[in-house]
């Protein structure tokens, strides 16, 4: 009889999902952390680097590295905040929005490939159960616990 440890199966699938996602975003010239930063910037609008670090749960110096890389790729720009002229807010450029759109397509394809053997009902139930576990364990929804390392 096969080993049925739920924790082990989650670890196996998590590792598979993370490595396949990293390969997908690498095809776009990004790291998973850079993709996450693009998504957060567009969903929250006008964040400073410090606020972005808090949102991601990582140290500000790590955010600087990721934002510098995205700025170097022409995907993000720092603009003086309208609320506080002493700080800079982060904005996506047109290239950043294009990359974010491609990431969204890749994300849908990634989800579909990973859950291919499931029916729509099973896929919905799995998503609900996983969200319940994420919440129970105090994890940040939408933020991979390894963020900032890639």
Image (cartoon, rainbow, N blue to C red):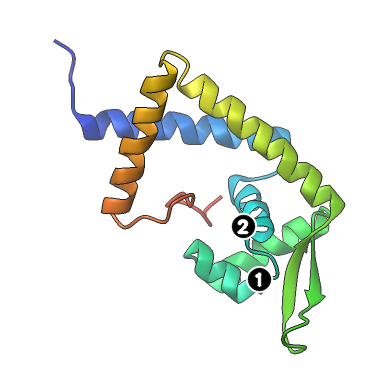
Q: Please tell me which residue is depicted at 58% across the width and 73% down the height of the picture.
A: 51
Which SS class for mark 1?
loop
Question: Which residue ends up furthest to the left in the rendered image?
Answer: 1
Where, by quadrant of the figure, is residue 7 drawn? top left
Quadrant holding the N terminus: top left
Image mark count: 2
Q: In the depicted view, which residue is nearer to us: 25 or 123?
A: 123
Q: Which residue is mark 2?
A: 40
Drawn side of residue 118 relative to residue 112, left or right:
left
Neighbor class of circle 1 (other Cα within 10 Å; few <14, some 14-19, many 20+) is many
Q: Which residue is mark 1?
A: 47
Q: Please tell me which residue is depicted at 59% across the width and 75% down the height of the picture.
A: 50
Q: Is residue 64 above or below residue 5?
A: below
Which SS class for mark 2?
helix
Question: First in sequence: mark 1 or mark 2?
Answer: 2
Q: Which mark is residue 142?
A: none
Residue 43 horizontal/vertical position (percent)? 64, 57
Neighbor class of circle 2 (other Cα within 10 Å; few <14, some 14-19, many 20+) is some
Residue 44 horizontal/vertical position (percent)? 63, 63
Drawn side of residue 33 relative to residue 143, left or right:
right
Drawn side of residue 83 relative to residue 55, left or right:
right
**Can residue 2 be seen from the camera position used here?**
yes
Tell me the CA gap for discs 1 and 2.
9 Å
Residue 49 horizontal/vertical position (percent)? 64, 72
Where, by quadrant of the figure, is residue 9 drawn? top left
Q: Please tell me which residue is depicted at 60% across the width and 25% down the height of the picture.
A: 109
Residue 21 horizontal/vertical position (percent)? 56, 34
Check if mark 1's residue and mark 2's residue have beta carbons within 8 Å.
Answer: yes
Q: Is residue 3 above or below residue 103?
A: above
Q: In the depicted view, which residue is nearer to us: 50 or 117?
A: 117
**Can residue 29 be seen from the camera position used here?**
no
Question: Which residue ends up furthest to the front in the rendered image?
Answer: 121
């Amino acid at each position: 009889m096969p080993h049925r440890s739920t924790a082990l199966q989650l670890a196996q699938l998590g590792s598979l999902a993370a490595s396949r996602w990293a390969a997908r975003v690498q095809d776009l010239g990004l790291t998973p952390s850079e993709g996450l930063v693009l998504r957060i910037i567009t969903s929250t609008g006008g964040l400073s680097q410090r606020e972005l670090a808090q949102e991601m749960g990582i140290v500000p110096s790590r955010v600087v590295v990721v934002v510098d890389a995205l700025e170097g790729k022409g995907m993000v720009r720092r603009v003086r905040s309208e609320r506080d002229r002493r700080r800079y807010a982060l904005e996506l450029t047109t290239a950043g929005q294009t990359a974010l759109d491609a990431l969204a397509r890749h994300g849908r394809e990634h989800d579909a490939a990973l859950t291919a053997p499931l029916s729509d009902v099973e896929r919905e139930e799995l998503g609900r159960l996983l969200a319940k576990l994420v919440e129970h364990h105090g994890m940040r929804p939408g933020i991979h616990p390894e963020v900032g390392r890639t």
